[in-house]
Image (cartoon, rainbow, N blue to C red):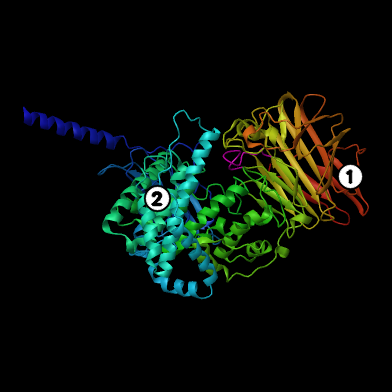
Amino acid sequence: MIQLFRVCIFVCCCSMALAGAWSLDLDERPPETGDWGYRPETGAEPDTNPPGFSWRPCPGAAAYHLQIAGEETFEDIAYEKSDVLWSAHRPSITLSPGIYYWRYAALGDEDARTDWSAVRVFTVTPEAVEFPMPSTSELLERMPAEHPRLFFRPEDIPELRELAAGPFAERFEALVNRADRLLEDPPDTAEPPLYPEGTQRLSDEWRAIWWGNRRYTIELTDGAATLAFVYRLTGDEKYGQAARELLLAFAEWDPKGSTNYRYNDEAAMPAMYYPSRTYTWVYPLLSEEDREKIASVMRIRGEDCFNHLRRRPHLWRPYGSHSNRAWHWLGELAIAFHGDFEETAKWLDYAVTILGTAYPVWSDSDGGWHEGLAYWSSYLRRFAYWGDVMHAAFGIDVYRMPFFSNVGDFGLYLMPPGTRHGGFGDQTTTMRSNSIASTMAIFAASTGNPYWQWFADAHDASVGGGYAGFLRNIKATEIESKPPEDLPSSIQFRGVGLAVLNTNLLNGEENVQIHFKSSPEFGRQSHGYNANNAFLLNLHGHPVFLRSGRRDIHGSPHHRNWMWHSQSDNAILVNGESQIKHVRDARGEIVAFHTSRMLDVVSGEAGESYENLDTWKRRIILFKPHKTLTHFLIHDVLEAPEPSSYQWMLHTKGAMDIGDNHVGWEGEPGRVDVDFLYPEGLAITQTDEFDPPPAESRGWDLNEWHLTAEPPEKAAQQEFLTLVTVNGANVRVDTENSSFPREVTLNWPTGTATVQFEDTAFTVTLPGVEPRTFTESR
């Protein structure tokens, strides 16, 4: 009877295994909203060689088999890897320029295997940047077997000590002084508190603990890392022993408690990377018992982070915010603790796979960043640590990647020195150009870009302090500075759908600047939620026409219902309704762009951003006869499926003067006049109320005014033609032309300009210049 029972168990187990093998099937559905997609897609010309490959995960797959071939029959294999752990991979070799085909299969337990996927074809161009990713085994061979492993290697220590005692003595002395203060007054080591029972998420009490625990964790763990770094460069064990004591005290914290990743990821992330740095720098002073204790805690923290990233799954659905910094903190942990527990090789492989195939997600090759300048600075400044780690541990220069080779252009063009507003995106309204200067210095030091170094020098900014700043300053001393006099004054970041028009790139205080957004790839998701076809105006560095509201806390009623609503932007509502809020599917597109010394133009299409609109084309034509006495036309064409009302929105700091189809605003930077040339009879109103307002506990007096201009009649088709003049620019518009508003004549003291609008093109004629036609892609 027992033998029969065993046979039954064996048969059942075999049947389940076979059923599992038979059920392994590829899911090749097209990508959905939020998916990264199959990359490279058919017809693509990737900007790197080799490209990163990505496909939809197969449920039950243990690994994948990737093939790349020079012809469709796959008889000539250019690259093959049969043990890819994830549904993404960047090969370790470069490919010769030409046409290639790729496919993949999923592998299950034992011999289970799917059929090959659909074949996709792409082209490697000669211009593609070479960026192969070494295999994990090669990375581990490159990595120091001993410690330290993060930011510098064992063989670097003698030279660093010489520099700390010589040309960089003053900077190192600042680090030593901080370490001495930590010895005299060490940080509190008690475990941070949990949220009291009944705490309401997003409340002031919740926020105080949520962010307070992050700061508390950083104070302890970064303090330990600073002590450990000073120990490594001085050899003085008093600093090392103090770092060890703090690290061991941190190891007493419950990794499933108040700093657990799912409980509070803002506290959990610094609890991953600072202890990793401390561990690898203070390693010689740790006993075997110390190492086991610390490693056991960090293993749990790493596993929690890894499981969070895999649960999404990040490689296929990478459009998260916090996850896009969590993965490289996991990478630091994997390097520091390799050899202490077995998961580290897998985590390292995962981190470098994200880097090679799905990062950065919010960007384009031009250097644009969908989430706006505040998140560009915050997230990429954090990523710069990973860039330093990759270079020291593996000899890989991440700044060779196309985005990172252009990354500083985003700051250079959005905030010329003296600018006091960061543009679209969360948390930009209080930014100043000096707030990104240190970030620009880091990028300059990492790439050698002289224009970015000029920006940093214009603000007397360095790469920062601390141990990372000390190491980066060694590179920064070699960078020359060059003002961007030979660069175009304006730029388009094509992938993120942002154009920035400047009359003076060298000095924000003498600049007229327009930001225009219409995003084809990212829409209105995440922190880049501003309306497509919205615009901003800065004058002499000050915001004049602005995106309104201020985030009190992410996801609050004011954030969701005012700032995510198109009523908060210089955009157009349809029947009082917003564009689709806070989603990727609310897309736009910049369909024309041009910049020159005399003229900038940008055109966007945003009809897909609405549920009740077929098309909205907005054209902006900036005339630049003088850097501060300038003007621009805005031409809006809207078509709806039925007669609708349209609300043309405008927001300013301080009230506007309203007249007959005219609005005036005056403030510290000067005067701006808005003439609604078409249609006539607009109903123009303004208010300083928010619906809903920011939390009263913030105590803000934003003094922002919101204007609405609405035509008198509903219409299925509606045009607006608007002239904006700056500081009394001398221009008159002829509105008597029979073709008006599709043909406009501008009379200047120096001559006459004309603009002719067609459905998918417009022509501008300047005095003494041949007409120039700008054709729109749709």
Q: In this orientation, which residue lies closer to the viewer: 245 or 664? A: 245
Q: Alpha-carbon distance for marks 1 and 2?
A: 59 Å
Q: Amino acid at mark 2?
A: Tyr
Q: Is residue 528 left or right of residue 274?
A: right
Range covered by the magenta-colored residues: 520-532
Report which quarter residue 640 is drawn in.
top right
Q: Residue at image x 93%, y 37%?
A: 736
In this view, the mark in front (1 or 2): 2
* Chain-order first, disc 1 or disc 2: 2
> Where is residue 547 drawn, in percent x and y?
70, 40
> Where is residue 537 drawn, in percent x and y?
75, 46
Q: Main secondary structure of the magenta part?
A: loop
Q: Is residue 521 magenta?
A: yes
Q: Which residue is mark 2?
A: 350
Q: Which residue is mark 1?
A: 745
> Where is residue 86 drawn, in percent x and y?
38, 47
User: Against 392, is 372 above or below?
Assistant: above
Q: Which mark is residue 126?
A: none
Q: In this orientation, which residue lies closer to the viewer: 257 or 679? A: 257
Q: Is residue 630 left or right of residue 16?
A: right
Q: Residues within 10 Å of mark 2 (few under 14, many from 20)?
A: many
Q: In this figure, what is the number of numbered marks?
A: 2
Q: Is residue 727 left or right of residue 251?
A: right
Q: Is residue 316 magenta?
A: no
